[in-house]
Image: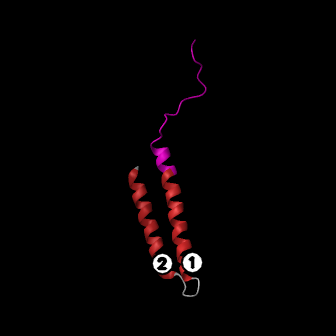
Amino acid sequence: MGGYLIVIVALVIAALSTVSWFATPKGVNQTLLRTSILLTLTACYLMWAITYLAQLHPILSPRRGDLRFED
């Protein structure tokens, strides 16, 4: 699946952001609620995407620790 999952989840987050923008109840704290919801969705998506991509394409190759080196 690779990189397509990042795009699919980004589209889901964009849809949730749009829904939350229009579903926020009107009132004194409407701007605060909208900002909090959008920032939370964005931060959670970024954290997930960075972690997923770091595991998908690691910088260092994993090495087995149970092997003995021959001297």
Up the image or down, 12 lies above or below 1; here it is: below
Mark 1, Cα crowd under 10 Å, few <14 / some 14-19 / many 20+, is few
Q: Amino acid at mark 1?
A: Leu
Q: CA distance from mark 1 to mark 2?
A: 11 Å
Locate residue 70: give its quadrant.
Answer: top right
> Does residue 1 appear in the picture of this structure?
no
**Image vertical order of residue 61 relative to residue 56, above or below:** above
Q: Quadrant of residue 44?
A: bottom right
Most frequent secondary structure within the magenta stretch: loop
Position of residue 44 relative to residue 20, above or below, is above
Seen in the picture, residue 40 relative to 23 is either above or below; the reply is above
Q: Secondary structure at mark 1?
A: helix
Q: Do callouts 1 and 2 mark residues in contact (Cβ within 8 Å)? A: no
Query: Which contiguous range is marked in magenta?
Result: 51-71
* Residue 38 on image: x %, y %: 51, 70
Please say whether residue 28 is one of the residues in the magenta stretch.
no
Locate the C terminus by quadrant: top right
Q: Residue shown at 52%/55% (left/top)?
A: 48
How many neighbours does mark 2 have within 10 angstroms: few (below 14), some (14-19), or many (20 or more)?
A: some
Residue 3 percent coordinates (x, y):
39, 51
Q: What is the number of callouts on the image?
A: 2
What residue is shown with label 1?
A: 32
Residue bearing mark 2: 21
Does the magenta segment cover residue 58? Answer: yes
Disc number lying in front (1 or 2): 1
The amino acid at mark 2 is Trp
Could you tell me residue 26's position as x and y percent? 54, 87
- Mark positioned earlier in the residue sequence (1 or 2): 2
